Amino acid sequence: MIKDLDDLDGVDWAALGHAWGAADDVPDLLRRLVGPEPEARADALNGLRGAVHLHGDVFDSTVAAIPFLLGLAGDSRVPDRAGVLGLLAHIGGATRREDPGPDFVAARAAVAGAAPLLLRLLEDADPDVRRAVPATLLVQRGDAGTILASLHARVAAEPDPDVRGALAAAVAGLGRLAAAGLVSGVDPAAVGTWFTDWSAEPDPADADVRCRLAAAADLVDTAPEALAGDLIPAVVELLRADLQGVAPETLPALDASRWGDLASVVTPTHISGLRPAAGGRDALVEDLSLALDERIEDRVALLTGLLSAGPPAARSAALRPALGLVGYWRGDYTDLVALVGAQLTDGRLAGRAALVLHHLDALAAPAADALAAAVASAAPESRYGDGPPPWVVTWRGWEPTVGPTVWALAALDDDRALPAVRAIVDRDIPPGNSAPLAARYATTAPDLLPTVLRRCAGSTGDAAAGHRRVLTRVATALGPAGAEAVPELLAGPIDLITATALGSIGLAAAAAVPALRATLGRDGGVVAAVALWQVTGEARQSVELLAGHLDDPWDATSFAAEAAGRLGPAGAALEAPLRALLDTADDDIHVAVAQALWRIAGDAETPLPALTRLWTAEPRRRLEIAAHLATIGSAARPMRDLVAAELRERFRHSAAFNGWSSRQVALDLALLRDGRTVLAATSPP
């Protein structure tokens, strides 16, 4: 039903209600929609929305107002009809899956019943009206075949590209509704095919490119299932065309005051971080990728299509979602990662590509040659900017850090990183994160230890502390081969990491025995106890100290249990208190106890019920549980099915708990590696 404003007095508005009470002010708001002042009309529309449709609610007054709103929408003399149509679309439930009450049902029926009027308005002289109508048609339920045919026909005849985009978005919306079983007469697969054909029409004008991309963006929110595989290449070509004219020099420069700000440039998130802007399409690429969800192959096709031959702005737009894809989903990313690596030769994109590869751990292998070339051509030290990142990045007001290309190459254990590693270790003050880097190469580059010792001997203050951090990690990695470091290690305080290094060196660190014994009663005493056994071969003192930590379940920690396990059979006296800890309610200690019982007594079976329960109840423990299972061989068979189920998951295990972490790929790869070891060891004979 459609009514004129002359009929407003025929409704008892005072008997109806809206968000703020009696609806007797609705007639005045409706009349003001046709007033002479644009500002007053806008205020009236906002007032109406805030009264009869506040927060999406529908009241009896809302239903009563619909015939009058339809009358205004159909009267060409009324200004601002597009706003009226937008309100009708929301009231009628164009974006609402369900109608939670009778007023909602009545509102939808009233708007949907005006389909003949709305279809006529598709040919209205006002393009704003034509652009607003398609969304209003999505209130339809039941047979929508006629509406779909009208939208198709109008796309072909419509001269305005923005209106064509709105029409196409409505087609997508009908596809979504059909897929959900809410309308009939529409084939969702046919909607996807139509989109593919429409998007792939040759040589679209610039305006058409924009309207087609706008329609693709609407697909993300309305009908992601319509993003069929064949549509991906068409969208890639549209994005390339849209971004072709964006000059590389207009891409925002990488400028950050500290590492955290820089890393956020590629951190895959919708709600925070720096999102470089290039024609407004960076967000669209990320949204399209996210909308494809578990369709890994389609997401790879979208991003490789942009990275392989796109203009710089298109390739830039693909980097952030590439990290989001690889970082959250398991899959084969060989080609995608290789293309990310290829961006290291592009001055404006090299810094962004390096940040992506820095997060990928072993998955960066397809880009190894590109990383090696970037490291070889990089400056030893500079601020972060265009071109290959330096070996060491300097920051205003913050200590230097190791550059991402060096880290990414080192994560592959690639010896081509060694020239940079040697230079980093030999700096006057080593970067704060250089110690684990040096440790990775300690055994393959034995010259690192003499370099660090020389630097320790000739430095003081912050420099000496930095070199000592590197020394402890290198000595720990070398084990007995690091005996040369003992005097320098003893020249400073025996803290936790120093005790670990001395224990790793073992018998050759005999000179450290007095210092280690003096540490037993202080913080770090548990580590010192294990180190003392490693250095002397005598376990008595170590066992006595650890027993004091393990005998009381309230005092026991996973740290003490792990230390007990490092004693191996020499810790046999600790077996009983360790077994007792399996019955405690402290889930944090059970995995460490299982590891200790295996190392001390060779008992893999007793802890399995606790580990099985933890695997399901505390999924965040799976990484450490899998690492333990990988060491016990066929004894892990009772948990084989659980491990196999985890390996079949496509979403990265570590991503579920971290939100986003630079280590989540590395952690998930470790879980997958250990899981495969378990399956191999427990396969049926």
Image (cartoon, rainbow, N blue to C red):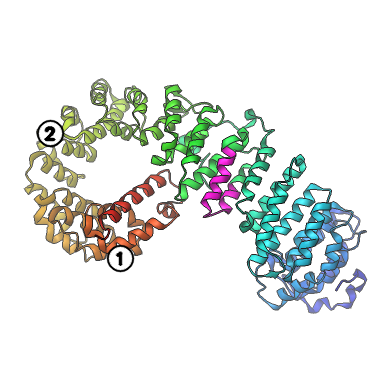
Q: How crowded is mark 2: few (under 14 residues within 10 Å), some or many (20 or more)?
A: many
**What's the amino acid at mark 2?**
Ala
What's under tag 1, amino acid-wise?
Arg
Q: In which quarter of the image is residue 595?
A: bottom left
For mark 1, what is the residue? 613
Where residue 479 appears, as percent x and y from the top left, is 18, 35
Residue 484 located left or right of residue 241: left
Identify the image quadrant of residue 512: top left
Question: Splitting the image into 4 quarters, where does residue 106 fall?
Answer: bottom right
Quarter of the picture holding the C terminus = bottom left
Residue assigned mark 2: 509
Does residue 623 lie above or below 248 as drawn?
below
Q: Which mark is residue 665?
A: none
Asked if the residue at tag 1 contacts the one at tag 2, i.e. Cβ–Cβ closer than 8 Å, the answer is no
Q: Position of residue 522 (x, y in %)?
A: 18, 44
Q: Which residues are the magenta region?
A: 286-307
